[in-house]
Amino acid sequence: MIVDCHFHVDETMLTLDKMLEGMNENNIAKTALIAPMNETMFEMESAYQRNLQRFFRFLILNAPQIGLKIYNSLVKDGSFNLYGHSYKIYANPRNELVADAIDRFPDRFLGWAAVNPTIPQSMEQLHSYLNKPGFIGVKAHPFMHEYSIRALDPVASMCEAKGKPMIIHLSSETDSYKYLPENYPNLKLIYAHAGLPFWKKLWKYVKDQPNVFVDTSSDYLTPSIVKNAVETLGYRKVLFGCDGPYGMIEFNEYDYSAKKDWIDSLQISDNQKEYILGKNFLGLIE
């Protein structure tokens, strides 16, 4: 069974019906949805964007001090600034959109309950969403919401106690990827986008942490980065994800096959690919 562990629901960009079409065409049985973190950000991909992405990846991999400065500059004063455009960040994520999608298609969608620990209302709502059918864990975004990883202490403690996984988009805070595994050793933890913005440094650490994984979502990545992550971590530590609808080719059209091909093209056995494409994730949420 193929399961996408990381996809955002935003019907201003991609309707649920079109999402299901793409899932069906690529034999994706289920998708774990996340609330949108920011206002609609749809624009056609251009050579300018591809070149900037290529340059950013090069700096993160080869000159991380410079790369991290650029990464930090993307978020300021509650806005996500990308390719010359500014998008409002939602301080309190709209988990109701995920709940509605699960209600409409309970056999196809799962849900991450997104939380901002600096917003009391978000923390109060978290327990309610985790008790709803279909919600499987917690999404945290210290990068966009601009808080220290330590602010997640109460959330991590709760998830560890309940056996619920957390998926986190890291900020550039120094060694932040070590904090939760070392303080909550039984917490099931996924670092989004293969551990952006740390990548190689994070992989070396994560490979020895039994409950820590990375996903393959996002246009931040490339087939080469995914290949290197799998080679470093092993196939049992990597989860398939897309991060759609971001990276769309045109409105209401999303190419699932591009991200799936990153896994299909790996020089590993079909059985090992099956773990990346779904078995690893299903094992975390059972």
Image: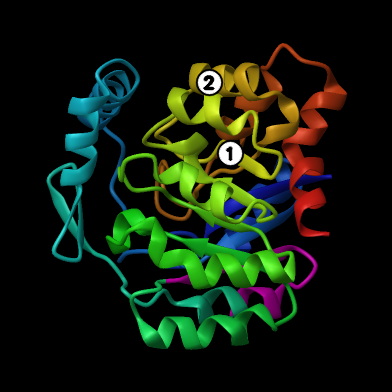
**Viewer-nearest of discs 1 and 2:** 1
Q: Farthest residue in the front direction? A: 183
Q: Earlier in the sequence, mark 1 or mark 2?
A: 1
Q: Which residues are magenta?
A: 100-115
Q: Residue at x 64, y 67 (%)?
A: 159
Q: Residue at x 48, y 66 (%)?
A: 153
- Left or right, 209 with respect to 133, comes to left
Residue 237 sits above or below residue 130 on the image: above
Q: Residues within 10 Å of mark 2 (few under 14, many from 20)?
A: some
On-image quarter of the N terminus = top right
Whether residue 181 is in magenta: the answer is no
Observer able to see residue 41: no
Residue 251 sits above or below residue 248 on the image: below
The reply to whether dot 1 and dot 2 touch (C-beta < 8 Å) is no
Q: Residue at x 81, y 33 (%)?
A: 274
Judging by the rendered image, the residue that carries numbered circle 2 is: 223
Judging by the rendered image, the residue that carries numbered circle 1 is: 214
Residue 189 sits above or below residue 231 on the image: below
- The total number of labels drawn is 2
* Numbered circle sitting on residue 248: none
User: Which of the pair 245/205 is nearer the observer?
Assistant: 205
On-image quarter of the C terminus = bottom right
Whether residue 101 is in magenta: the answer is yes
SS of the residue at dot 2? helix
SS of the residue at dot 1? strand
Observer able to see residue 31: yes
Residue 46 position by quadrant: top left
Q: Residues within 10 Å of mark 1 (few under 14, many from 20)?
A: many
CA–CA distance in space, label 1 to label 2: 15 Å
